[in-house]
Amino acid sequence: MFIFIRRPVLRALCALFLMLLPAAVAAGQDPNPPTLRSTQGAWPIRRQWTPAETRHYAKWWEHLYLMKTTGDPEQRQAKLERLLTDPAMNLLQDPAFLGEGGNPQLPGDVIRAMHYLMDCGKFTAFMPAYYAYRRALPWMTAVVTSGEGDIRTSPFNIPINSVNSFAYPSVGAFFREAVGCFISGNYRVPLDGKNAHLTDTVPVAVTREFLLPGCVNYVDGHCLMLAQVSEYGELRFLNCSTTTSRDIFSYNGMNVVTGITPRGSGSTEWEGCFQGLRVLRYPLAVTDASGRVTSVRRRTDEEMREFGFSTEQYEIVGEITRTHTIAMGRLKAQSFHDFVRLRMKSVDRIAPMPFMESYVDEVLEAYLGRVSFVDDAWRDVRAHGPIVYPEELPKENIFQALGRWETWSSPSSDVDRRNKYFYLADWMEYAIRLYGIDPGFVDLAGLEKYAVQTQSGLAKAMIAEKNRLFAEHALEYTTSKGDKVRLTLLDIEARLYDLSFDPNHPPELRWGAPAGSAERANAPDRPTPVPKGGSVSMEDAYRWQYFYRTLCERETGMSCLRGMFVKGFPVRDKLDKQVGKWVDDAPPAAAP
């Protein structure tokens, strides 16, 4: 039976868990005691990667996630140094969890140097390397070159070398090379590509045995670390921003598991098959008969099978594309997200009301993080002048740029927030579909007053409760004149496609204040400069940027501004209209 725990109670339980943890860990045995010895390399190697070690690694990740999402305010805002040095956050600070033969904490100057390097890709390179160092495990990171064009968006990349912990004279030297040379393009190596056996990761089977915290999700230039799998089969991630503050934050929602290329859909069998869920290609320490390490190498695909290597993601996506459904017992998956949920769930029923109550907290948290970011961007523009829009540049666009635009614009994070919002709509539809297949699979606790008996009734009830919850959750932002404006999630939903990502725009436009409103009346008119000189007026830039404000995926091509089309393209229905299509007598919904 599934019991839902509200967040305040969860935090109390978390505190109790932390009090009991050292004794519990100490009472247990090291799942992977040291058996190796070495004197060469950046650090001593005393352990081999094993399936038991990856489960220990998964516990470490899940605990980091738990503290980042349910700890005290300082822990929820922790950046890299706090994450690694706070004993309540980092289990490797507990000698019992670290185990015999573990290495000491990474030097402070190295941690701080890594902090300034962080982005989403380097975070996925640093964190497993840090764990390997502390647990005295071997580690390697690939060095790749572009197969064609920008390495971040190339259709394929080629591993040409590896940064190997066994070959470096010091910890600092290894981390500088292993993390400093790592980019998101490291993941863009097809399974049948040149030197594919040198990749950092391989695709993983979608099962609770193998898809563990510590796995990676890669989607077209964006990398995240899986940090928890909920009882519903929801995947939850940790991510690091590219802003100067290098924030580390939770990234919840299956919307990020997208863009997986079906097997055989390109000119070769595995063309483009590098996006999706992946397990680290754990290095292997080669030893002599006495257990002395003589070298460190990559595991082969075959050797990675015991860690979950599988190509099923690309086959499942292909089957869903062809047949639109996959039977899974008495239930049917109608999307890859459904497939993941049904494979990964650990409960026999889903409960829409507790899920919505918890998820609305997460939606609000995503927008709360935007408040300080918009404030900081506006402060930077006032202090240092306007920021050039990357218009029609061959190697940059609004989602992948250099300099101040990359730091202070928000098109990528706004895509993520829109997807977090739409994930709620998708999940509600998921519950409605399951109710139609098997009503007993859906726990209606909290929805009793609606007397739900049909899919239409469930849709009505969930829309009503969503609107109630959205009206109760609010944030406050500061206008360019210093006034405070309160916005509920209902307000933000209404403005979903109006929130400007352009850092040159004052906070009123960044938060979508309607034209002609008192809220927007005193906003200063700030133009947006373009690369070849000159600038575009604020109103024109805002109008021409509308298309990009509606996107739910990042684009890799060049970005336009002047003369950009402002209509004639699809705009996704908002939640009430999307879920309302299940309501038999649904009134016409307003246009987005």
Image: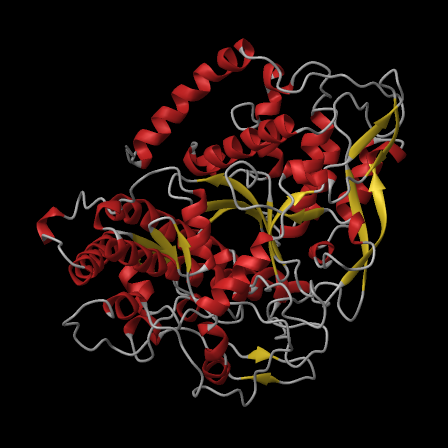
Relative height, residue 69 to residue 484 (above, below): above
Q: Nearer the viewer, residue 186 or 433?
A: 433
Q: Quadrant of residue 146?
A: bottom right
Residue 489 is situated, as x and y percent measured from the top left of the image, at: 30, 58
Left or right side of 149 for 251: left
Q: Nearer the viewer, residue 98 or 260?
A: 260
Residue 398 is situated, as x and y percent measured from the top left of the image, at: 60, 71
Left or right side of 511 for 131: right
Report the coloring of the rendering: secondary structure
Relative height, residue 39 to residue 115 (above, below): above
Relative height, residue 496 to residue 333 (above, below): below
Residue 393 is situated, as x and y percent measured from the top left of the image, at: 69, 78
Q: Nearer the viewer, residue 452 or 263?
A: 263
Relative height, residue 81 to residue 16 (above, below): below
Quarter containing the N terminus: top left
Q: How many marks?
A: 0
Q: Would residue 488 be visible to someone looking at this image?
A: no
Left or right side of 369 for 307: right
Left or right side of 311 for 255: left
Q: Would residue 284 be visible to someone looking at this image?
A: yes
Residue 290 is situated, as x and y percent measured from the top left of the image, at: 87, 15
At horizontal 37% and vertical 30% (from top left) the residue drawn is 11
Quarter containing the C terminus: bottom left
